[in-house]
Each structure stands twice: as C-alpha cells, then as structure tokens.
Amino acid sequence: YGALFYMLLSMATGIFYFTWVVTGASMSIGLSVLIIGIPFVILFFGSVRVLALVEGRLVEAMLGERMPRRPLYASTSATLLGRIAEMFTDPRTWATMLYMLLMLPLGIVYFTLAVTLLSISLA
C-alpha cells in the first residue's frame, strides 16, 4: 500500500518539482544580470539539494528502499566559496534537477496507472 500511495502522490510531487526547477532556473537566468542573481542561484541550487534529500526520505518511508544519505564533501576544510563551487560542479546536483524535470511525466504515468488499475480491480 505504501507503493500505491507513492504512485498517487508522485503526480503532486512531480508537479511541484517540475515547477520548482523551471521557475528557479528561469529566475536564475533572468536575475543573473543583477546583483541579486548570484545569491539567488546559490539558494536555488541549495534548495534543489535539500529537496533531493526530502525525496530520498520520502522514498525510504513509503517504499522501504534505502536511499543514500547526504553526500560527503571531498574536503571539510574547504572554504565557503569552495563548497559553493563544488555544489555547482557536482554531477549529482545536475542529475537531481533532471530527475525533478522528469518527475512530471513520470508522475502522470504513475498516477494514471495507479488509478486505472485500482478502479479496474475494484470494478
């Protein structure tokens, strides 16, 4: 039942993730010419990483599948600017944004399958 609920919930999370990434990336590009653009981009990338952590906990709770914890930093003695630069060059950040973009079509497919199969089985 946890997997069924996850399939139903994936449409809502897919819409949210897709909207978050498209809006955040568009505003990051648009604000890049202003002084507020750089902090906005940093906050956006940080929020994507936090949402990835939340999605991992959601999968763990509903599906019982162990997800990797927060990635370890290569060097904990790095400066703040070094950690920010590492966040931008980390392939997991970009893969997370791609996953969030793909969650909308996947969420629609999961939701459609769950509702269709559930209604067929109940009928």
Image (spheres, rainbow, N blue to C red):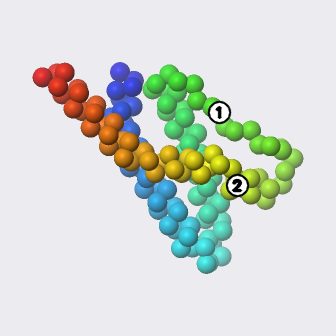
Q: Quadrant of the C terminus?
A: top left
Q: Locate residue 116, reporting x and y percent.
A: 21, 32
Q: Is 107 situated above or below 38? A: above
Name the residue: 65% across, 33% down. Answer: 69
Residue sitting at the far left:
123
Residue 63: percent from the left, percent from the top? 46, 25
For this rendering, which residue is in front, 94 or 50? 94
Q: Residue furthest right?
A: 77
- Residue 77 located left or right of residue 58: right
Splitting the image into 4 quarters, where does residue 51 fall?
A: top right
Amino acid identity at mark 2: Thr
Nearer to us of marks 1 and 2 is 2
Q: Amino acid at mark 1?
A: Arg
> Can residue 12 be seen?
no
Q: Residue at 61% of width from left, 73% of height from top?
A: 32
Residue at the spot of label 1: 69
What residue is shown at x 65% (from left), y 49% (from top)? 91
Taking the spot 46% from the left edge, 60% from the top edge, the residue there is 22
